[in-house]
Image (spheres, rainbow, N blue to C red):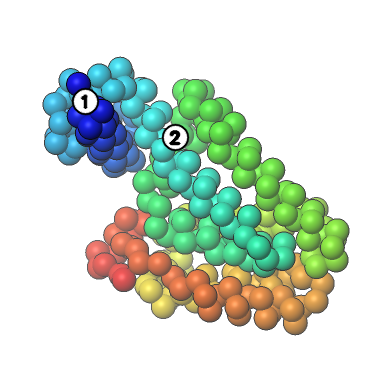
Amino acid sequence: MTDQATHGSTDRSTETRARILDAALREFSANGLAGARMDRIASTASVNKALLYYYFESKENLYLAALEMISAKVRDRTMAVFLRESSPGERVLRSALEHFDRILTQHDFQALMQQEMIRLHKGESETMSILVKRVFAPVMTMYQAMLREGIASGELIDVDWMQIQLAALGANVLYFLSSPIWRIVMPTDPFAREVLEARRKAIVEFLGQAIFIDRQRGAELAKRVLADTPMPEHDIRLIFGGSNEREK
């Protein structure tokens, strides 16, 4: 076989594997490990079912590969914020905004994480320990170092670094998870575009006032971060049972 033929075969194999992983990600996020069907994955990927086992050997291995794929993308996107050439305080603001937008757009990842947390609580998950080692631990280490740098430089207030993280990221999680309650007690749809834009703006502005020693500088950084980071396109039908219209 010529080098050109070998290269073409490798490209097709890589493309087929990627197509299978994309199909598996959608199937597992929608139905979980137990409810997912290998024949549906094969049909969505437009491949023979036998190819799934050729590439991944088992349903469990395919699930792990799909979870690792999407988790690595989330990790790399988060790390890119941490490694940005800017002050620690600005990076904290950008990471809070990136986290909000991730929940808003990365529906497959959010669904899989919820499923894994339930499985972990039941003592059924062997996957979470792998994800913690490869994804969450490096992110946590970088986040802690970023906050400690900001505190040591005098940019950020001198408090427990984890409390800043909880204030920055926990508010995002609470907002999305509590959306069914917001629908009942608030006069607005929590997933209306203007409401989401106001909420992501509020979290950054709040942090600009809450964690910076120089509040004026914090406000200026918050304004800058919001100005160059518009809210991404999203399908609200996929967010925790959002309404049936598409927002862009």
Q: Closest to the observer: 146 or 38?
A: 146
Residue farthest to the front?
Answer: 2
Q: Position of residue 140 (x, y in %)?
A: 66, 44
* Residue at figure coordinates x 72%, y 65% from the top left: 87
Q: Position of residue 214 (x, y in %)?
A: 80, 76
Query: SS class of the residue under badge 1?
Result: loop
**Label 1 Cα neighbours within 10 Å, binned few <14 / some 14-19 / many ≥20:** few
Image quadrant where one finds the N terminus: top left
Q: From where the camera sits, is residue 19 visible? A: yes
- Identify the residue at horizontal 67%, vertical 81% (top origin): 220
Residue type, numbered disc 2: Glu
Q: Residue 164's x, y, as percent?
A: 72, 58
User: Is residue 100 placed above or below 78 in the rendered structure?
Assistant: below
Reply above or below: 58 against 47: above
Q: Which residue is mark 1?
A: 2
Disc 1 marks which amino acid? Thr
Disc tally is 2
Whichever of callouts 1 and 2 sits on the residue coming sooner in the sequence is 1
Question: x, y (%) of residue 242?
Answer: 33, 61
Label 2: few (<14), some (14–19) or many (≥20) C-alpha neighbours in 10 Å: some
SS for callout 2: helix
Question: Is residue 132 found left or right of 11 in the rendered image?
Answer: right
Identify residue for label 2.
Answer: 68
Residue 94 vs residue 58: left or right? right
